[in-house]
Amino acid sequence: MRKIVYIMAILIGAPVLLKAQLNPLGSQFYINQYLINPAFAGTDQGLKINGAFRKLWSGISGAPVSQSLTADYGFSKVGIGLNVASESAGLQREIRAVATYAYHLKLNNEANQLHFGLSGGFTNQRLENNDVNGDPNDPLIGQYNDRKTYIDGDFGVAFTSSKWTIQGSIPNLKSFFKKETIKQADVNVFYSAISYKFNFNEGLNLVQLEPKVAYRGVKGFDNIWDAGAMVSIANKRILFTGLYHSNESGTFGLGMDFQNKYLVNAMYTTETSALSGYTNGSFELNLRLNLSKK
């Protein structure tokens, strides 16, 4: 029974946490790029606070749940930030917290900038004793939970202009450089993306279209392409997002930004083709308080 509890926790928890990386939080593509790239911490002067909640496979006990909270502050050429994320699936829990330092270098044109970011912090993975259907004092569970919290971090770079955004990042530096690290959730290998803004009309009638293509690696799986666009209307007050992922899933979002200060955004990601006949997709809610000066 001990071995069954332990093995089932790994077999059930590991794949669903891994799936969270196959379809990561949709907000990382447009709403909160700091989630995936530390170079975006403090790109605007002032404070921004973002929160996200996502639940997969509604109606299934032990279904994956993702939560994140970020805060970043920009001043002069420097940005600082804090990125805290929580993942749960079955018995498994993961908490990751990193602090970020970013440097924003203006080029010959003030709208053209280079951004560099480095994050450092910790990741902790454990089994939740209260959810064990059996003996919570099982020594095998204790051995799993006795594993040390390990130091982790991220690195990212980006180029931005009034039109272009070109970026690349290496999340989970510990896993990238030390292949023996146990990996249940931190399996992102790299992230890269390019986007271009098209502006139509001006003032309150401004309509902006930003197509984006992203390419990311997930350890143990084929690399994934993401392609789509965000359309904002009424001077960026109403946001529509649509993305197609090469694992045959799609992400769709609708948001409202009140006074460029309070943002509410909802997103839905369909299941991958292999699971679409068995489960629903995932629903994600994003909130943002923007006290920055643009």
Image (cartoon, grey):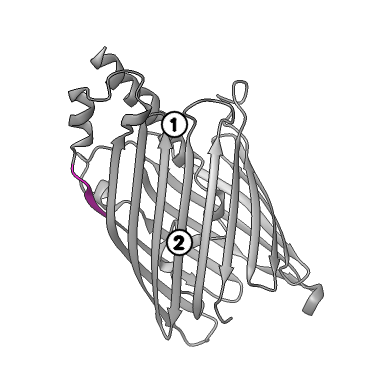
The mark found on residue 70 in the picture is 2
**Amino acid of disc 2:** Thr
Classify residue 259 as left or right of residue 227.
Answer: right
How many other residues sit within 10 Å of disc 1, few (<14), some (14-19) or many (≥20)? many
**Amino acid of disc 1:** Val
**Residue 163 image offset from top left, x and y in percent:** 61, 72
Picture quarter containing residue 31? bottom right
Query: Looking at the image, is 78 positioned above or below residue 284?
Result: below
How many other residues sit within 10 Å of disc 2, few (<14), some (14-19) or many (≥20)? many
Residue 187 in magenta stretch: no
- The residue at which mark 1 appears reads as 16
Q: Residue at x 18, y 37 (%)?
A: 146
Residue 219 visible in the shown view: no
User: Disc 2 versus disc 1: distance between alpha carbons?
Assistant: 23 Å
Residue 151 in magenta stretch: yes
**Residue 240 image offset from top left, x and y in percent:** 71, 55
